[in-house]
């Protein structure tokens, strides 16, 4: 009966994962549309991600600061269930703000774009609360050893939302899924009203669900004043770096130098914010090694490295698809080789199917990674590792019925086969899985950088397949051995979704200065760190077990 209740509770819980996927993936279509509609550059268009994913960081940080001041874990006192409900209600407010924000919006009205960012920020704040509760909640609903598999199952539902999200937004804005429709930005009002209604409905389901436990924990709050102060300093650094860049876009800003020089200074400022993130966490890593007092969960090296890994993973997952629309919209300039991909320019509605395929790749990987949840026999498991990925791919094709050519289906089928081989090599081991898929992901980005046409396009799109199972692997490895600091460590990891706010704008500005294709070196560096993280974490956890 207990197992049955857990399954019922898990089924209720994973509904929120769908929303995260639906809204997050929709940005892939929304970003190139906003760039053209509001007449902004690539960096500014990436502020959609900055607002949405930055809210995760701010929400988790504020909760941590308030808990530190009260010396009481506010979220734990609420319980996972109430915390998720509160998050859904905050996201409802953000969805409702979108209605007046875009009412009567006309092309070129940049000020309207900033109101859209505010609405997305509020939705993201709600998601921050939901994410803080949902991940450890899913792990707690059963055997801890299969916790990462339950996260993969929830991630599979999340990825179904990411698969249909871009298509829904394209259909709503343009009234068509293929070809060139007439953009009607005002239709987004109806979408977000519907999303607000679904948020409220989901909150009600959680509230009245008898199978879903409250998830209240009575663990004492573990203070970490040094960690809190460092995170506040990091926030100030990010605020100053991006604040200056935003100011340079204001009409009142007078710059006497060249435009090219200004662009380089903007890039330097946002890279400084990235250095700030890495520097602050490294500082905590070094200082806590000699004196752990005041650092809380950050005294554990696997968490510090894991925070950077989550930052990097979310950043690369988001930045690949957020800039993919620009790759698909640019016509190759044969004289100046501005694009170099050798692809025909695509309209906004035609982009949606490729964004859907990218996020669908995450669904394929997560469905496959969730197989262990059902405890199949060894023989059945091997068969499912081959069959499930292609069933998931079939769902993607069905959702995008008639959109892909047979050649595109064949190419992606081959890439799926490469992923299947990766699963067999990794053998369900978190560190091995990270190594294998990070290496394949890095290779895919290099192929995309040094090739053209369909090969380059599908190399970039395949990034979704190889990012798919990284979150549960990194999350579970990072909180291993944290003991009483597990809850705090989970909160720090959620803060690092900040990577989705900082890395895409960096790639966007590189694309503004150089080319969109060359900007994918950012993705290469991200995968390189994830490979390094896998090797370092294996050594750290191994040493802790020995000691």
Image: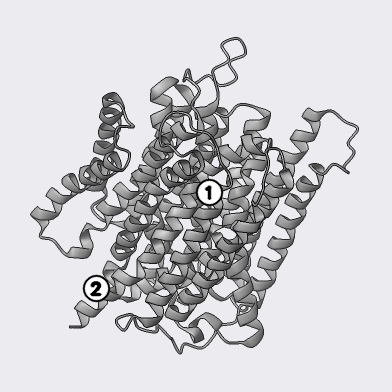
In the rendered view, would you say 201 is above or below 279?
A: below
Q: Residue 343, percent across and down?
A: 46, 20
Q: Residue at x 15, y 50 (%)?
A: 384
Q: Residue at x 45, y 20 (%)?
A: 452
Neighbour class for label 1 at 10 Å: few (<14), some, many (≥20)? many
Of badges 2 and 1, nearer the viewer stands 2
Most foreground residue, 311 or 384 = 384
Q: Residue 338, percent across and down?
A: 60, 19
Give SS at disc 1: helix
- Residue 285 shows in the view: no
Q: Residue 473, percent across and down?
A: 37, 58
Circle 2/circle 1 CB separation < 8 Å: no
Give SS at disc 2: helix
Count of picture labels = 2
Q: Residue at x 38, y 57 (%)?
A: 158
Q: Residue beneath label 1, please? A: 315
Q: Residue 288, percent across and down?
A: 60, 70
Neighbour class for label 2 at 10 Å: few (<14), some, many (≥20)? some
Query: Which quarter of the rendering shows the N terminus?
Result: bottom left
Instruction: Please indicate whether residue 422 sits to the left or right of residue 59 in the image.
Output: left
Query: Alpha carbon of mark 2 to alpha carbon of mark 1: how far?
Result: 32 Å
Most foreground residue, 158 or 198 = 198
Q: Quadrant of residue 286?
A: bottom right
In the rendered view, would you say 540 is above or below 441?
A: below
Query: Disc number at residue 394?
Result: none
Q: Residue beneath label 2, please? A: 7
Q: Quadrant of residue 429?
A: bottom left
Q: Earlier in the sequence, mark 2 or mark 1?
A: 2
Q: Residue at x 49, y 84 (%)?
A: 78
Query: Which quarter of the rendering shows the C terminus?
Result: bottom left
Most foreground residue, 172 or 412 = 172
The colour scheme applied to this rendered structure is: one colour
């Amino acid at each position: 009966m207990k197992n049955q209740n857990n399954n019922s509770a898990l089924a209720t819980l994973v509904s929120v994962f769908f929303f995260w996927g639906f809204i997050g993936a929709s940005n892939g279509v929304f970003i190139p549309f906003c760039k053209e509609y509001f007449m902004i550059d690539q960096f500014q268009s990436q502020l959609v991600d900055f607002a949405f994913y930055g809210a995760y960081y701010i929400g988790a940080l504020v909760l941590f600061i308030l808990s530190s001041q009260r010396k009481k874990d506010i979220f734990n006192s609420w319980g996972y269930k109430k915390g998720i409900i509160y998050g859904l209600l905050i996201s409802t407010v953000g969805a409702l703000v979108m209605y007046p924000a875009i009412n009567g919006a006309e092309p070129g009205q940049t000020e309207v774009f900033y109101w859209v960012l505010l609405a997305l920020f509020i939705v993201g704040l709600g998601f921050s609360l939901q994410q803080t509760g949902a991940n450890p909640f899913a792990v707690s609903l059963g055997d801890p050893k299969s916790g990462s598999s339950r996260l993969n199952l929830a991630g599979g539902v999340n990825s179904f939302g990411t698969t249909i999200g871009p298509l829904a937004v394209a259909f709503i804005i343009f009234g068509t899924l293929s070809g060139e429709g007439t953009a009607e930005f005002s239709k987004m009002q109806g979408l977000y009203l519907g999303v607000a209604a679904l948020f409220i409905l989901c909150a009600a389901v959680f509230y009245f669900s008898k199978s879903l436990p409250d998830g209240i924990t009575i663990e004492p709050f573990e203070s970490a004043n040094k960690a809190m102060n460092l995170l506040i300093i990091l926030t100030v650094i990010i605020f100053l770096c991006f604040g200056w860049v935003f100011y340079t876009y204001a009409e009142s800003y007078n710059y006497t130098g060249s435009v090219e020089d200004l662009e380089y200074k903007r890039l330097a400022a946002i890279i400084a914010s990235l250095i700030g993130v890495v520097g602050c966490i490294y500082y905590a890593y070094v200082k806590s090694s000699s004196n752990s007092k005041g650092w809380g969960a950050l005294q554990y090296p696997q968490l510090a490295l894991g925070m950077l890994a989550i930052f990097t993973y979310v950043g690369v997952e988001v930045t690949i698809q957020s800039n993919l629309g620009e790759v698909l919209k640019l016509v190759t300039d044969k004289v100046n080789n501005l694009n170099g991909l050798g692809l025909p320019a695509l309209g906004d509605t035609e982009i949606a199917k490729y964004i859907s395929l990218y996020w669908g790749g995450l669904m394929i990987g997560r469905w496959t990674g969730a197989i262990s949840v059902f405890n199949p026999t060894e023989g059945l498991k091997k068969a499912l590792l081959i069959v499930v990925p292609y069933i998931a791919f079939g769902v993607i094709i069905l959702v995008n019925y008639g959109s892909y050519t047979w050649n595109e289906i064949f190419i992606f089928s081959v890439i799926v086969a490469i992923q299947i081989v990766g699963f067999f090599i990794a053998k369900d081991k978190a560190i091995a899985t990270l190594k294998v898929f990070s290496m394949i992901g890095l290779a895919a980005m290099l192929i995309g950088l040094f090739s053209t046409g369909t090969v380059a396009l599908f190399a970039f799109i395949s990034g979704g397949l190889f990012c798919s199972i990284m979150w549960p692997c990194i999350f579970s490895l990072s909180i291993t051995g944290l003991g009483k600091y597990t809850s705090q460590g989970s909160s720090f990891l959620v803060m690092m979704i900040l990577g989705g706010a900082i890395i895409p704008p960096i790639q966007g500005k590189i694309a503004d200065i150089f080319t969109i294709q060359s900007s994918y070196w950012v993705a290469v560096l991200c995968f390189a760190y994830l490979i390094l993280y896998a090797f370092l974490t294996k050594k750290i956890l191994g040493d802790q077990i020995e000691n």
